[in-house]
Image: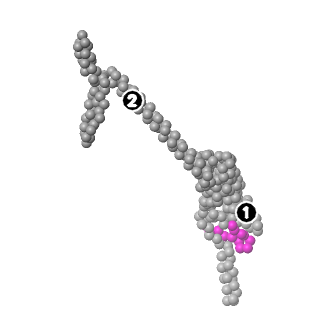
Amino acid sequence: MPAALAVIVIFIIFFLMSAIRILKEYERAVIFRLGRLIESKGPGLIILIPVIDKMVRVSLRTIALDVPPQDIITKDNVSVKVSAVIYFRVMEAKKAVVEVEDYLFATSQMSQTTLRSVIGQSDLDELLSARDKINKELQSIIDSHTEPWGIKVANVEVKQIDLPVEMQSAMARQAEAERNRRAKVINAEGEFQASQKLADAAKVIGEFPTAVQLRFLQTMSEIATKNNTTTFFPVPIDLLAPFLSKDDDKKAGAKK
């Protein structure tokens, strides 16, 4: 009797260990009974029939899948190396187990081929400046292919773009030329605005000739504040015109 009781106890323990499963909040169990799909259960405590039921555990958490760098030739024949990262999660555990053998490997391969295809149809300038557009296009294409597997692709981000050294030098020269062009344009606009202001000032001085004398006196005052031993100050001919006219009158009277 003790031996038989021990066998029964061991059998009960084995049965409980084989039948009872505890699933976490983010896990689901896809159950097969004699090879046929029954249902998915979880989270919490579930009971299986030993030997008859088989369980496949599936995580419903978001997975960040790294796409390794891919050597791609763009539409304008530039060789680049592009890497990306994909965020997805399993929405239907039964499809993720039944419809595809390994959904992680399948999603990775689908992501790599789609990345090569989309980048190959884009120009280098578009790849560098319109990355959001390319990310959305990648997300849409990959999501449409993985939907039958019960997988939802939430986001795709192009992580890094490696350019050849020759292309980096060419882009650096292009950026430098663009900065020089902007500097020349800004300088020309400044000269144009200054010329307009000078023209307006000339009109005012033309209407009021005494303004020239006031300007000269102001300049002399500014120069006097500095520690200068010698000062060269131009005197306009207009200031000497009254004196010159008097000398001419005296010379004309003397000749008479």
Q: Residue at x 36, y 23 (%)?
A: 203
Q: In this rendered view, identify the residue nearer to me: 233 or 247.
A: 247
Specify whether 213 is left or right of 185: left
Q: Residue at x 70, y 58 (%)?
A: 109
Q: Amino acid at mark 2?
A: Lys
Q: Amino acid at mark 1?
A: Glu
Question: Label 1, on which residue?
Answer: 101
Residue 54 part of the magenta segment: yes
The residue indicated by pointer 2 is: 197
Helix, strand, or loop for circle 2?
helix
Quarter placement of the C terminus: top left
- Tell me, for residue 216, which label it has, or none: none
Q: Nearer the viewer, residue 55 or 76?
A: 76
The verdict on residue 191 being magenta is no
3D distance between C-alphas at marks 2 and 1: 78 Å
**What residue is drawn where x is 46% and y is 37%?**
187
Q: Specify start and end residues of the magenta stretch as a single range.
A: 44-56
In this view of the protein, can residue 108 be seen by the observer? yes
Front position among marks 2 and 1: 2
User: Badge 1 local density, few (<14 within 10 Å), some, or many (20+)?
Assistant: few
Q: Answer with mark 2 or mark 1, whichever residue precedes in sequence.
A: 1
- Residue 195 appears left or right of 57: left
State which quadrant residue 101 falls in. bottom right
Where is residue 51 shown, x and y percent of the image? 73, 73
Give the main secondary structure, helix, strand or loop, of the magenta stretch.
strand
Secondary structure of the residue carrying tag 1 is loop
Residue 49, x across and y down, in percent:
71, 71
- Of residue 126 and residue 112, the one placed in the foreground of this image is 126
